[in-house]
Image (cartoon, rainbow, N blue to C red):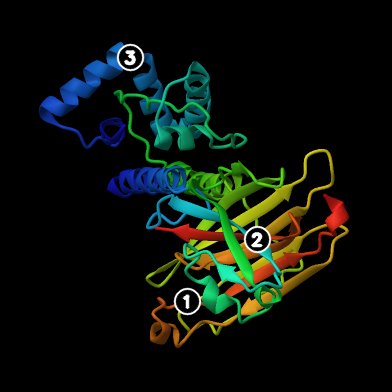
């Protein structure tokens, strides 16, 4: 008889444990990694020109003096900072900002990946052109904090427009 | 329930026996349980009783699992409060029925666990598209630099320029600059 009751109680306990575990831990979720806030994404609009009268680089563009030795920056010798904005990033919440050329930039933090002590940000970017086909339908990159990437090529005011996108802590 | 089982097995004594016998005398459910224990009808009674209680909207996970014995699985089904024990006069031991009930509870719980895990799959599935990875590094290396996962710019030429990390940046007064990329998308001047 005691065996019978023992089986009954054990069955109930195990059943309750399994059911509760399934409820509490969503599929694919690691309880040791709660949902992340993304921090801030900084978007800088840079106007690049080729000038015959000698070049210049806006002093606020601190990294550009190095970058201008590499393609495609080497094509230009004048860089002006047009705008710089910091946008809040949260997972799966797109942020949209107008660009100086009338197009619209959309940035979405897809997710955050932990690699050891580093956090890597999976970012989705799109550039819409109102009334036209999207200039950039989709760009997905993975980058760490303070690791910028650039989107270039948009024609603007006799030159081109570079977008520098970087996640800040 | 445990006390009902003990009563049915004739293992209750003293005050506990009196209390449970009183319960059985005054409660039809308790009577049914004890009768079932003595005549092997508990499994069928549990199914019927729990189904009725589930429909009535009580709450409780373990009991919900019990209620699902022999019934289709439903996520978020209302759970049930277990029937309170009762008392009886006979004592017939039918261990097989209870072993089957316990095994069924375990199986149902396992099935619920698997079902719930599947039902709440992450919204973002792994993308199996043509990912072009730039600046790929060995898995053992520290994460650094920008990786391009996917680009889609319909009807436009796309180039990706990889910019190596600036090792000597400090020498020119610059902070360390990690590897980066420039995604270049063709945009003829007349395009704007």
Q: Please tell me if label 3 and label 1 are on a single chain.
A: yes
Q: Quadrant of residue B168?
A: bottom left
Q: CA distance from mark 2 to mark 3?
A: 66 Å
Q: Is residue A86 left or right of residue B171?
A: right
Q: Quadrant of residue A117?
A: bottom left
Q: CA distance from mark 2 to mark 1?
A: 21 Å
Q: Give yes or no for contact between labels 2 and 1 (Cβ–Cβ under 8 Å).
A: no
Q: Mark 3 sits on what residue?
A: B27
- Residue lying farthest left? B14
Residue positioned 73% across, 67% down in the render: B184
Work out whether residue A71 or residue A10 is closer to the camera in this orientation and state it: A71
- Residue B172 visible? The answer is yes
Vertical order, A12 against A164 (above or below): above
Q: Mark 2 sits on what residue?
A: A140
Question: Mark 2: few, some, or many residues within 10 Å (few <14, many ≥20)?
Answer: many
Please state the horizontal and vertical placement of residue B118, each as a whole percent of the image. 60, 49
> Depth-wise, is mark 2 or mark 1 nearer the camera?
1
Q: Kindly identify which chain the residue marked by label 2 belongs to.
A: A
Q: Give yes or no for contact between labels 3 and 1 (Cβ–Cβ under 8 Å).
A: no
Q: Secondary structure at mark 2?
A: strand
Q: CA distance from mark 3 to mark 1?
A: 78 Å
Q: Is residue B33 left or right of residue A77?
A: left
Please state the horizontal and vertical placement of residue A53, each as a whole percent of the image. 67, 72
Q: Mark 1 sits on what residue?
A: B177
Q: Earlier in the sequence, mark 3 or mark 1?
A: 3
């Amino acid at each position: 008889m005691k065996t019978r009751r023992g089986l009954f109680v054990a069955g109930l306990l195990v059943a309750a444990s399994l059911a509760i575990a399934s409820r509490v831990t969503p599929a694919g979720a690691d309880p040791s990694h709660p949902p992340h806030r993304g921090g801030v994404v900084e978007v800088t609009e840079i106007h690049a020109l080729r000038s015959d009268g000698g070049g210049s680089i806006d002093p606020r563009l601190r990294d550009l003096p190095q970058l201008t030795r590499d393609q495609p920056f080497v094509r230009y010798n004048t860089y002006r900072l047009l705008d710089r904005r910091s946008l809040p990033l949260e997972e799966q919440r797109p942020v949209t900002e107008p660009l100086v050329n009338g197009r619209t930039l959309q940035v979405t933090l897809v997710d955050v990946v932990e690699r050891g002590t580093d956090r890597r940000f999976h970012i989705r970017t799109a550039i819409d052109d109102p009334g036209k086909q999207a200039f950039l339908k989709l760009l997905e990159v993975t980058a760490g904090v303070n690791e910028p990437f650039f989107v270039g090529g948009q024609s603007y005011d006799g030159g081109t427009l570079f977008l520098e996108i970087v996640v800040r802590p | 329930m445990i006390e009902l089982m003990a009563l049915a097995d004739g293992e209750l004594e003293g005050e506990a026996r009196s209390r449970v016998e009183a319960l059985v005398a005054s409660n039809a459910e308790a009577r049914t349980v004890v009768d079932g224990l003595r005549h092997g009808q508990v499994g069928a009674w549990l199914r019927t009783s729990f189904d009725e209680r589930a429909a009535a909207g009580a709450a409780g996970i373990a009991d919900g699992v019990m209620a699902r014995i022999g019934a289709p699985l439903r996520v978020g089904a209302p759970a049930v409060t277990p029937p309170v024990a009762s008392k009886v006069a006979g004592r017939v031991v039918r261990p097989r029925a209870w072993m089957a009930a316990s095994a069924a509870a375990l199986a149902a719980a396992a099935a619920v666990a698997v079902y719930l895990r599947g039902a709440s799959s992450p919204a973002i599935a792994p993308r199996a598209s043509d990912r072009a990875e730039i600046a790929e590094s060995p898995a053992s290396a520290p994460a650094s630099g920008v990786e391009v996962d996917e680009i889609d710019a319909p009807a436009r030429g796309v180039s990706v320029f990889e910019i190596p990390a600036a090792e000597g940046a400090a020498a020119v007064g610059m902070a360390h600059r990690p590897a980066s990329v420039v995604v270049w998308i063709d945009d003829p001047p007349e395009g704007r």
